[in-house]
Amino acid sequence: MVSPAGRSDRWMVVGFLVFGILSRLVPHPWNVTPVMAIALFGGATLPKGWSLWLPLAIVGVSDALIGWHATVPFTWGAVLLISLLGWWLRPRPSAGRVLAGTLAGSVLFFLVSNFGVWLVGGLYPRTAAGFWSCYVAALPFFRSSVVGDLVCSAALFGGYAAATALRPARQTAGRAGFP
């Protein structure tokens, strides 16, 4: 699954970059974009440098177009952590581990981004009650995020597994990953 930054890796990065940015710019249900799935998939499949820069570039460019917000360090940090979570999938990718990684990534993003909303967003008082209110108010967004992350991760990892299974054996020799 992991390969040196070859021509196909570069095209995959460019494709994910464009797709990820566009997915945040077009109308979509709240928190349903492929960005978290791209971060997890990139962490699992791309060379480590690319796997970190790709999701940061997606959120950086799209946030520049959508508008900056006070919680940028938290949302970008969460995306970066999800890319690192993808590194955990590298040695033994399987459907179960992808499912666990996807759910962990959704929870991680929920916890980190809403902590940022509570801390610097100005919407909730910096009290225990405000902290609790922030997370409770975010639950509908979390549900959407989990569904979107599961669907997008299944599409990316499943599509990749299907595509690599169809490649002639000589092209996949030496690549770790899905059968």
Image (cartoon, rainbow, N blue to C red):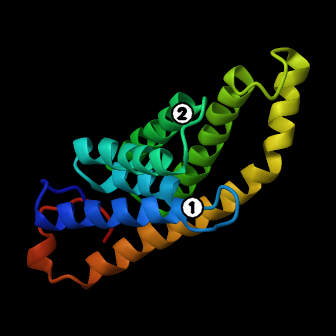
Label 1, secondary structure: give it.
loop
Side of 26 relative to 49 (left or right) = right
Residue nearest the observer in this picture, 169 or 22: 22
Residue shown at 49% from the left, 37% from the top: 76
Tell me where residue 81 appears, x and y as whole percent: 46, 36
Residue that numbered label 1 is attached to: 33
Give whichever of discs 1 and 2 has the lower sequence position: 1
Which residue lies at the image location 80% right of the left edge and 35% below the top edge?
Answer: 135
* Residue 24 spot, x, y in % from top left: 53, 59
Q: Determine the image quadrant of residue 114.
A: top right
Q: Which residue does the image show at 31% across and 43% down from the upper left?
A: 53
Q: Nearer the viewer, mark 1 or mark 2?
A: 2
Q: Quadrant of the C terminus?
A: bottom left
> How many marks overall?
2
Residue displayed at 13% across by 54% down:
5
Name the side, left or right, on which 62 lies relative to 133: left
Task: Residue at the far right: name it.
Answer: 129
Amino acid residing under circle 1 = Thr
Q: Which residue is mark 2?
A: 72
Q: Which labelled disc corresponds to residue 133?
A: none
Residue type at numbered disc 2: Val
Between 119 and 43, the one lying in front of the other is 119
Quadrant showing the N terminus? bottom left
Label 1 vs label 2: CA separation? 17 Å
Q: Is residue 102 above or below residue 130?
A: below
Residue 178 on image: x %, y %: 33, 67
Q: Is residue 107 left or right of residue 155?
A: right
- State the residue in front, 12 or 168: 12
Element assignment for label 2:
helix
- Vertical arrangement, residue 45 with respect to residue 105, above or below: below
Q: Is residue 72 above or below residue 89?
A: above
* In the rendered image, the vertical position of residue 144 relative to residue 134, given as above or below: below
